[in-house]
Amino acid sequence: MAEAHSAVAFSFTVTPDGYDVRINHEALKAVWESGVVSWKKRIGKLKNNIHNGVFPASLYSWLIVVTIVLAVQLVSYDPSFGFIQLIHLHIPYVNSASSSLLGLYISTIVFGTLIWIAKFLVLKYLLKLLLSYHKWIYEVHGRTSFTTKLWFTLIKLYGGRKPLLMSYQASIPKLPVPDLRSSVNNYLNSVQHLMPAEKYKEVETLADDFCKGVGKKFQRYLILKSWWATNYVSDWWEEYIYLRGRSPIMINSNYYGLDALLVHNTSVQAARAANLIYAMLMYRREVDREELRPILINNVVPLCSAQYERQFNTTRIPGIETDKLVHFKESNHITVYHKGRYFKVLIKHKQRFLKPAELEIIFQKILDDNSAPMEGEEHLAALTAGERIPWAKARQEYFNHGKNKTSLDAIEKAAFCVTFDTEPQEYDPKDPSKLDRYGKAMIHGKGYDRWFDKSFTFVVCSNGQIGFNAEHSWADAPVMAQLWEIAQDEQYKLGYDEKGHCLGTPECEPPHPIRLHWEIPTPCIDVIESSFQVATKLMNDLDLHIMMFTEFGKGFVKTCKVSPDAFIQAALQLTYYRMENKFCLTYESSMTRLFREGRTETVRSCTAEVCNFALALNEGKPKSECIKLLNKAAETHQKLYRDTMTGRGVDRHLFCLYVVSKYLDIESPFLSKALSEPWKLSTSQTPHQQTDRLDLNKYPDRICGGGGFGPVTDDGYGVSYIIAGEDTIFFHISCKVSCPHTDSHKFGATLKKSLCDMREMFSKN
């Protein structure tokens, strides 16, 4: 009640003796400071919008252009060929010599401004044209054509200076719709060697009928959409692949990330959390202010930055038919889960961010709190782990008013969620199973201790090791990997003292953590427990193995003059063949961020060439022949990868054609066939060192353990890998326990042998 009274800035009371006016100066000061901060943000946003609007030109160039035009005008030469005089005639002024001269100056400035506007529009269009050139990506390093050299020179000349995070957005080209026949032919090439001749002939006939028939109609609608929409794929991909899915997102959709495994900064749980959370909040501020540098390939070609916008303050809201993503413009708190209780933690005090030493005090209070969870509170997050429809109905019925709504708002409107685990996790070379348990703790935890709907949940283990669980619909893994990389690096600058606590001393009494309260009725508890049972079944069916491969890494593969990614993909195909005695349709994720709002595309990496290599090596063919086949497979793989990056992929095109067919209510046997084939091997490479902030040459032990995801099919594998250094590769292998012929540990052991056999292939003996 005292807090409520102090929150009132002004009160006016009429009494028998007159009136009584009371002013709370502290509250008025807080209101004033809040308003100042709000206006600073608006002004900062306006400045960024102006900067990005004229980019690659700058506001200083306006001054230069106007000054030159004025100077030329003053030497009695009209650079406008009469246009300045025309403007002058339409400016009202007093009919005197001084006013006429002033009017002439104003007219000259207006003309100079128009010239400058024309200049930055031309530059912006020219930059978009330059960024539409993609032949550079197909050229071999060291053998660059004259055209590409000229293109690089023009990009550097017209590409602008000191770009903000979103400066290039208006100049990044749209994703083009590939030619219909090309996409269908590429699809046929990707499956021909994986099908019996009779079945392939049937598919080929369906494909030909599609291209000659309804495919043309679908293509016209898609081209029309590409003209109108910023990206013809991304909105449908987000809606139909992610948000309309009614099955659990835990394991099936969400992915996870691990700590840097070779260094242990501190075992003080609250201190590690404080430094990392502070670093993440500073990263969020960089994103909000657009101070984060956009990623530039070769320090020249920008990638789309649209996905950063929803990294923080974002949650997925369940619905009956479809979920929706909700992003809040601002959030001044995080939520913390510990031992079944939820806490709201303010991250600011008097309009400044709390320092790590102050955050540590708050987190330690939570860790020392021994209060019991409220009824239904401990397993509450299981709702986000189970089926979507029961969660949507429960949210509408039980969390739409009162304490439950207030507490749920605190979670959903938080910058992100934090979980303090009560168990330790670590990498132990003497006990590899600990790394497997670490991965399972991050991908699903206990099934009720991660808020799976949040953009990401930051997990801090009892011994200070960390990880995260991320929801997938708002963005793809490289965006989270960049946050993770920068935050990990920043903690070293923040530092820890000899006892493992945060450096620095508190500058204020930090606000107490606010316990969230719930009134969960019995029917809702039944729904929670039902969702928890679904989550438990999913967790028990996950077979996850994390392998730290240290026999060799990027350094050795480079000596083979083979792309490291193509090398690993070849090893995965060899491994799958040795496991199953056959090859399968393989998904490898590639990015399309060279285009505006681009996300991912599929590299169909099980090519005929890589199959030939795997068969030759497995049959013991001569090393020279195997190397020749590997080089050919790598060339094919690199071309496919480059095709997907430059908008010539197959799968997103076919997917969008299928969506058009559903809107038009026209069945296509070819599309149904093409899109129903299972990806029994789903792979993805986690990017490392996306920025220059992480120096692995200087600190090689700071390599990240990467992250992973669940299997895509019931009888297949999910394999994520990160080339962590010159001599280390992490593999995250997942499959289902319920499938009798999949085994993640056996796959890992076979993969290790495949990699070593490929290394032996290059030996001189």
Image (cartoon, helix red, strand yellow):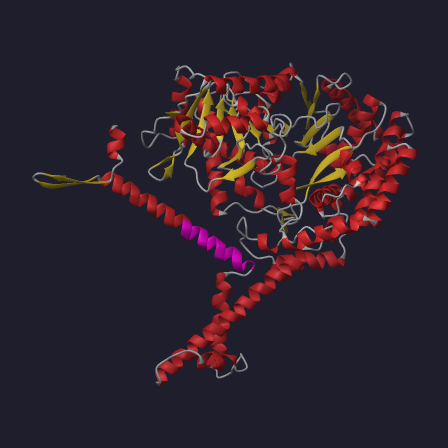
Q: Is residue 697 visible?
A: no
User: Residue 360 appears at what percent x and percent y?
Assistant: 41, 26
* Pick the front one: 76 or 446: 446
Q: Which residue sits at x=27%, y=32%?
A: 4
**Does the magenta portion include 44?**
yes
User: Residue 292 appears at what percent x and percent y?
Assistant: 52, 45
Quadrant of the image containing the C terminus: top right
Q: In this view, does 142 lie to the left or right of 266?
A: right
* Pick the front one: 80 or 137: 80
Q: Is residue 174 above or below residue 677?
A: below
Q: In this view, does 70 lie to the left or right of 118?
A: left
Q: Is residue 506 above or below residue 225?
A: above
The image quadrant that residue 475 belongs to is top right
User: Residue 536 appears at what percent x and percent y?
Assistant: 60, 17
Quadrant of the image containing the N terminus: top left
Q: Which residue sits at x=51%, y=64%?
A: 61
User: Residue 655 appears at what percent x and percent y?
Assistant: 72, 41
Q: Is residue 442 above or below residue 570?
A: above
Picture mark count: 0
Majority secondary structure of magenta residues: helix
* Pick the front one: 456 or 410: 410
Q: Is residue 362 visible?
A: yes
State the extent of the magenta-drawn residues as a range: 42-56
Q: Is residue 392 left or right of residue 37?
A: right
Kindly give the residue lying farthest to the left in the view shown.
17
The image quadrant that residue 341 belongs to is top left
Q: In this view, does 653 lie to the left or right of 396?
A: right
**Does the magenta portion include 236?**
no
Q: Which residue sits at x=64%, y=54%?
A: 228
Q: Which residue sits at x=52%, y=16%?
A: 423
